[in-house]
Amino acid sequence: MTEKADTQQRILDIAQHLVQERGFNAFSYADIGQALGIKNASIHYHFPSKTDLGVAMVRRYRERLEGHLSQFQTGEFPAASALENYLVGYRTVVHADGRICLCAALAADYITLPEAIQQEVRAFFQLNEDWLSHVFTKGLEKQELRLTSTPQEAAAVFLATLEGGMLLARSYGDMSRFETIGRQAIQAVLP
């Protein structure tokens, strides 16, 4: 990785940490600069505006999720295993220090975000819903799952359950709540 690319990734890493912890509107380039020991001008060189930084951050986050999800196509895995792997992926973004999914944090700031970042956040949630809908459709076809609604509706409910579970776990300062909620969400769709 080039020094420029490494600096960009470090900036994105710090920005993501700050958004997951505080929200998009509660950090500045000065916070990133202080954490990395660089000047604001260096950050502006890589990301001319905070919107540019936000778009790049969410896009990178979504692309990483796409890579994770592509490993668990339902043709190769039973639906319950696919959902378990999905939960494992979500578990990695629930931290004891209160940080949660980047897009869950951004959803809380949604109406104050620039349109370009809103679009990226929607694309992240749409990726999740599409993947889950596919898992639920295949799971129904193979009689591996039991749904009381359409696969698309079940996908939205499952995603909302996990995202809400993160917020509750954060509010209580008890990340084990997320695990309990996630396990219950999977159990609810098993026959």
Image: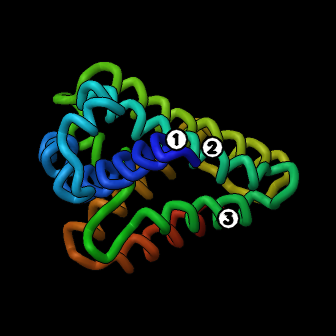
Instruction: Identify the residue at image location x=79%, y=45%.
Output: 138
Q: Is residue 20 visible?
A: yes
In this rendering, is residue 137 above or below 83? Answer: above
What residue would you read off at disc 1? 62
Asked if residue 24 is positioned above or below residue 74 in the image, the reply reads: above
How is the protein colored in the picture?
rainbow
* Element type at mark 2: helix
Q: Position of residue 47 (x, y in %)?
A: 32, 30
Give the labeled residue for mark 3. Answer: 190
Q: Residues within 10 Å of mark 2 (few under 14, many from 20)?
A: some
Tell me which residue sits at (58%, 48%) in the image.
1
Q: Position of residue 181 (x, y in %)?
A: 43, 69
Q: Which amino acid is tagged 1?
A: Arg
Q: Where's residue 28, x and y in %?
A: 15, 43
Q: CA distance from mark 1 to mark 3?
A: 27 Å
Q: Position of residue 128 (x, y in %)?
A: 55, 42
Q: Which mark is residue 66?
A: 2
- Mark 3 and mark 2: Cα distance apart in space: 25 Å
Among numbered discs 1 and 3, the one appearing first in the sequence: 1
Do labels 1 and 2 touch, CB within 8 Å? yes
Q: Secondary structure at mark 3?
A: loop
Residue 78 lies in what quarter of the image?
bottom right
| Earlier sequence position, callout 3 versus callout 2 | 2
Where the C terminus falls, by quadrant? Answer: bottom right
Going by the numbered disc 3, the residue's amino acid type is: Leu
